[in-house]
Image (spheres, rainbow, N blue to C red):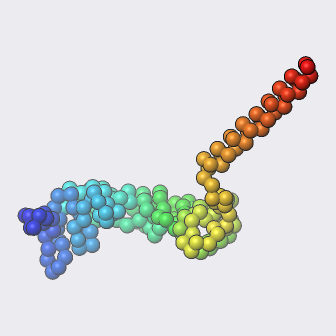
Amino acid sequence: VKTAGRTNVCTAASGKCTACTGAYALISGGCYGAAKLPGKVVCTAANNGECTTCANGQQPSGKVCPACPAGCSKCTGSAPSQQCSGCFPGYYKSGDKCVKCDASANGIVGVPNCVSCAPPTGNSGSVICYVKTDGTDNGGSTNKSGLSTGAIAGIAVVAVIVVGGLVGFLCWWFICRGKA
């Protein structure tokens, strides 16, 4: 059914969708396209109104994508023994779980306001924070000069060429003067 240029993909009752059609999946009372946001965050493929491929790696169960444990963007297995294979921003992978960057436990010290991190080396000490939300220094884990890696490499190459040219000139100067 088309209404004002739009295809009706929702069968509604009491203000909520109860069924969807085509490449739309029923998610929290609404029909969402699997090919575009926000639908593809939950379901990456749908057929006849049902999700066929969940974005988090789980198999659809009863037309619904099962949730992964907190912080996990992708997981394997079924509850309660799910294992995380990927983490959302603000979490790092520790074994088969995802841990918040700001969480402190078992000898690991979290970093407040950190949105991209890695576990500390040796699984003790402070979390390695790459990006913080408050704009403060993130503990020395980035290039403080502000130059890109390419710019630094270019400067190093130019410096080597200049030094090599200077050495070559001096050798030529002393060899030619020695003959005269």
Q: Can residue 99 be seen in this view?
A: no
Residue sitting at x 24%, y 65%:
32
Residue nearest the observer in this picture, 19 or 180: 180
Residue nearest the observer in this picture, 174 or 133: 174
Q: Considering the image in quadrants, where does the C terminus appear?
A: top right
Q: Is residue 96 left or right of residue 63?
A: right
Residue sitting at x 53%, y 68%:
115
Residue sitting at x 47%, y 57%:
85
Q: In this view, does 25 lie to the left or right of 101?
A: left
Residue furthest top as drawn: 179
The image shows residue 114 at horizontal and vertical percentages of 57, 70
Residue furthest front as drawn: 180
The image shows residue 163 at horizontal and vertical percentages of 77, 38
The image shows residue 81 at horizontal and vertical percentages of 45, 63
Label tally: 0
Residue nearest the observer in this picture, 146 or 32: 146
Residue furthest bottom as drawn: 14
Q: Considering the image in quadrants, where does the N terminus appear?
A: bottom left
The image shows residue 24 at horizontal and vertical percentages of 21, 61
Residue sitting at x 41%, y 65%:
68
Q: Is residue 118 visible?
A: yes
Q: Is residue 175 left or right of residue 113?
A: right
Q: In which quarter of the image is residue 53?
A: bottom left
Q: In this view, does 167 lie to the left or right of 113?
A: right
